[in-house]
Image: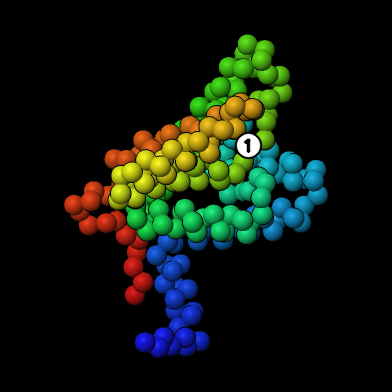
Amino acid sequence: MTVSLRPAALPRAIRSYVRRAPGTFIWLAILFGTSVIMHQLTPEILERVLQRRSTNIHNLLLSPGRVLLTSALWLDGGGWLLYFVVFNIFHVPAERWLGTHRWLAVMGVAHIGATYLSEGVLALAIHVDAAPHAAVNTLDVGVSYALAGVAAVLTYRIPWRPLRYVYAAGVLLFYTAPLVDGRTFTDIGHLTAALLGLACYPLTPRRNSAHATAPSAS
């Protein structure tokens, strides 16, 4: 059988691929824009910009809604191309499977829950003098908590139970391993986000019902 690779078919295939996970690609587009901005700023100005958007203790007390949203629109470490690949591995299949609204719900649970628990642990450490008071302004931006939650919830996408358990164990091992050496508040946040993702089973489609889908291309 001969497969025709017509040049006109490629743009249509790309449009169809993107439109089946619109939230993921809108997010990637925003992250691309903020990444470009980051590379144009001096280190001093960039520090001030990110501090304004950081989900640190100080900002969470003053304007929690604003920083919980804006902190997820900036990257902290790693290039945009790396996240483009990772988003296609985890976010794209998750959004297609769950549907955009439930995908957003899983990310919200993981991002918000992990942020508050990890910053709460940090606040406790400050209270008992295990961390300096200046840590209330610790820089904390990025997309990794939401990513950990989505990677974990994809456990339930795997139909074969033995492989499902292996995958879940791998995700938990990946996020638990850093705690052996470091035990930073972000390490705690990542593991929390993964556990919250696993707890989002009620948001996953039932196997005896139609799968949730993102808006279809027309």
Residue 96 visible, this angle: yes
- Residue occupying the point 44% across, 79% down: 12
Image quarter in which the C terminus is found: bottom left
Image quarter in which the N terminus is found: bottom left
Which of the 4 image quadrants contains residue 184? top right
Above or below 166: residue 137: above
Is 27 or 147 nearer to us in this picture? 147
- Residue occupying the point 81% across, 49% down: 42
Residue 194 pos. (x, y %) = 46, 37
Residue 171 pos. (x, y %) = 47, 41
Residue 51 pos. (x, y %) = 68, 38
- Residue occupying the point 67% across, 35% down: 139
Is 53 or 92 nearer to us in this picture? 92
Residue 65 visible, this angle: no
- Residue occupying the point 20% across, 53% down: 209
Q: In this image, 206 relative to 120: left or right? A: left
Q: In this image, 43 relative to 75: left or right? A: right
Residue 135 pos. (x, y %) = 68, 25
Which of the 4 image quadrants contains residue 199? top left
Residue on which the image places disc 1: 140
- Considering every residue shown, the one lying at the far left of the view is 208
Q: In this image, 76 relative to 108: left or right? A: right
Is 209 or 66 nearer to us in this picture? 209
Above or below 3: residue 108: above
Q: Amino acid at mark 1?
A: Asp
Above or below 62: residue 48: below
Badge 1 density bin: few <14, some 14–19, many ≥20, Cα 10 Å: many
Secondary structure type for disc 1? loop
